[in-house]
Amino acid sequence: MPLALFDLDNTLADRERAFRLFAAQLLEQHGLPPEHLPWLIQADGDGFVPRPQFLEAARQHLGLAVMLDELIRWYDATYPTCYVREPDSIKALRTLKQAGWLLAVVTNGRTSIQSEKVRRTGLDAVVDVVCISEDVGVRKPDPAIFYEAARRCGAPLTGWMVGDSASADVGGGAGVGLRTAWLHRQRTWDPAAEPPDLVVDRVADVAAHLLDSSA
């Protein structure tokens, strides 16, 4: 059976939308106006800024009367609830699954947070395996996490890696011999980097390509 590995945030799930909702709730929780939203989005760094660092910066910038530990606990409880079911992703994955593909989510992050995102988006009912970096002990692009996902699927590590990160998803996937699909999110690929096999706008585009190529 062919194997397809998928990133989670901003690939199968709309992290941008979820973070905007979280940031709006944070401001409302502390009685602050929505004018602070652009600063929070920039400070978040698309999720790549470590959470304690981001939350401490937000605490200081916004003048929040709360200790960092308490703010982190509130973040952990609130942020995953901002993720919602992703009908387009689920439809694309179900189409692949019906065609005989093995499907895995391979994501960096904490197990408790990422597992809740997968549950709330409804992806847990579609994919065969969820492979989270905290659980595995290594993060993408480390080859070990891709091999572990394939092992859990009971399949050799051949097939595709799909994601929005040039380094973690495309670079990591290519590094273990997978073909790669990059969700561009209105970005341009760095011409100095080894290009992905496929550049797409949506997961549905990937599914259509995989079905056509395996027909």
Image (cartoon, rainbow, N blue to C red):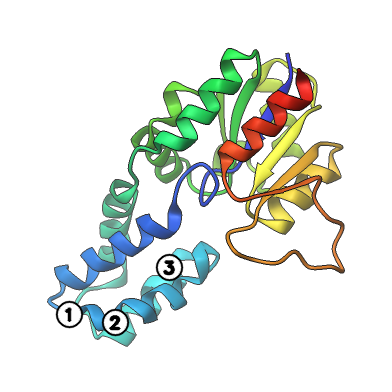
Q: Earlier in the sequence, mark 3 or mark 1?
A: 1
* Position of the N terminus by quadrant: top right
**Farthest left residue?**
31
Q: Secondary structure at mark 1?
A: loop
**Residue 21 at what x, y percent from top left?**
29, 60
Q: Is residue 195 shown left or right of residue 81?
A: right
Q: Nearer the viewer, mark 3 or mark 1?
A: 1
- Residue at figure coordinates x 37%, y 39% from the top left: 116
Q: Secondary structure at mark 3?
A: helix
Q: CA distance from mark 3 to mark 1?
A: 21 Å
Which residue is under mark 2?
36
Amino acid marked by disc 2? His
Q: Residues within 10 Å of mark 2 (few under 14, many from 20)?
A: some
Amino acid marked by disc 1? Leu
Which residue is under mark 1?
32
* Position of the C terminus by quadrant: top right
Q: Is residue 106 shown left or right of residue 46?
A: right
Which residue is under mark 3?
52
- Residue at figure coordinates x 57%, y 40% from the top left: 203
Q: Give residue 91's mark.
A: none
Amino acid marked by disc 3? Pro
- Residue at figure coordinates x 83%, y 44% from the top left: 174
Residues under numbered marks 3 and 2 in contact, where contact means CB atoms less than 8 Å apart: no
- The reply to whether residue 132 is in sight is no
**Residue 76 at what x, y percent from top left?**
33, 53
Q: CA distance from mark 3 to mark 2?
A: 19 Å
Q: Depth check: 199 or 178 in front?
A: 199
Q: Residue 165's image quarter? A: bottom right
Q: Is residue 65 shown left or right of residue 11?
A: left
**Residue 43 at what x, y percent from top left?**
45, 77
Residues under numbered marks 2 and 1 in contact, where contact means CB atoms less than 8 Å apart: yes
